[in-house]
Structure formats: structure tokens, C-alpha cells
Amino acid sequence: MPALGPDFRVFLDANVLFSASYSEQAGLAVLWKLRRVQLLTSLYAAQEAANNLDKEDQQSRLRDLLEDVEIVSDDVGINATFQVLLQEIVLPDKDRPILAAAVAAKADFLLTGDIQHFGRYFRQVLCGVRVLRPAEFLKSLAE
């Protein structure tokens, strides 16, 4: 009998990684305890989180958390269709690589706390990826 794969592929934005690493009691660490969920991020997002964590214990927590996260390529080959769709999505240049990596990784969800830039897209599906705040994702699993 083949092993069961994850139910969901979940891409974590830099701010989610940052929040989960910020303190030992971080509530978002629960994401790492979910069964049948494959956590994903990109080197770009991981580096952004690391750049914003200024204490060694926070950096250490981030490194530990990243051991259980699939790091997907930042060098995503974006086909012409996706380029057209991406142009229609209003995001700053610094956030486009996040969405592009989530799409290229075939993530089911992009979790982000970035209300300013992704807020207008919360609960929407962009190029096959549903954008949610982490709390909304966790709540949907409990329902």
C-alpha cells in the first residue's frame, strides 16, 4: 500500500516564518505540528525572515523550523500565461517572488500576515493558490 502524501501544500511567507521564530511561545509553531500538511517556503522568504530576526535564539529557532520545511526554488520558470496573470495582480515587486514561488511549488495555500499587500486577496485563489492568514487556515482545518 503506497504511503499517503500530504493533504495540503502550504507556502509560508516571510512574516509567518518570522512570527513563528520570534519567541518560544509563538502560537504559529502549531503549523509545524499539523499532520498531512507539507510546509513550503522559498530561500527568498527564509532570508527575509532571517534578516528581520535580530537575536541569536530567534535565528536558531528559525533554522530549526526550516529543517521541517521544503525550501522551493526562487528561480521559478514563469510561463507566459502565468506572467499575464501576475501582471493583473497588484503586488509590490518584493512580494511577487513570494506568490511566484508558491504557484511554481503547486502550493494549495499561501499563508501570510501581510495585510497591506496581500489583504485584498485574502480568501481568493490566485493562479491556483488560496491566500489566507494563518489563523484562517488553522480555523478552516478545525471545521
Image (cartoon, rainbow, N blue to C red):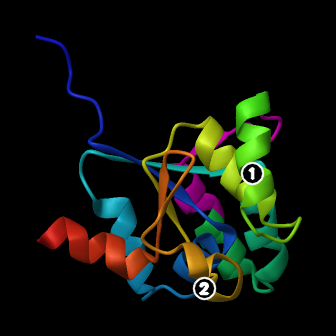
Residue farthest toward the right in the current orientation of the protein = 93
Residue farthest toward the top in the current orientation of the protein = 1
Left or right: where does residue 37 sit relative to residue 85? left
Q: Residue at x 63, y 76 (%)?
A: 118
Residue 142 falls inside the magenta stretch: no
Which kind of residue does numbered mark 2 sit on? Tyr
Q: Residue at x 52, y 37 (%)?
A: 106
Left or right: where does residue 136 sit relative to residue 100? left
Which kind of residue does numbered mark 1 sit on? Leu
- Give residue 48's mark: none
- The earlier-in-sequence mark between 2 and 1 is 2
Left or right: where does residue 143 sit relative to residue 112? left
Q: Name the image quarter holding residue 140.
A: bottom left
Q: Residue at x 53, y 61 (%)?
A: 65
For residue 36, say whether it is visible.
yes
| Vertical comparison of 118 with 75: above or below | below
Residue bounds of the magenta highlight: 63-76
| Mark 1 neighbour class, 10 Å CA radius: few under 14, some 14 to 19, many 20 or more | some
Q: Residue at x 20, y 65 (%)?
A: 141
| Residue 26 position within the rendered picture, expressed as x and y whole percent measured from the top left | 45, 86
| Residue 84 position within the rendered picture, expressed as x and y whole percent measured from the top left | 77, 43
| Residue 138 position within the rendered picture, expressed as x and y whole percent measured from the top left | 29, 73
Tag 2's secondary structure? Answer: helix
Which corner quadrant holds the N terminus? top left
Q: Name the image quarter holding residue 117.
A: bottom right
Between the residue at mark 2 and the residue at mark 1, the CA separation in whole angstroms equals: 31 Å
| Vertical comparison of 35 with 77: above or below | below
Q: Which residue carries the number 1 mark?
A: 86
Tag 1's secondary structure? Answer: helix
| Residue 66 position within the rendered picture, expressed as x and y whole percent measured from the top left | 59, 55
Left or right: where does residue 62 sit relative to residue 137? right
The answer to the question of whether label 2 and label 1 lie on touching residues, with beta carbons closer than 8 A, is: no
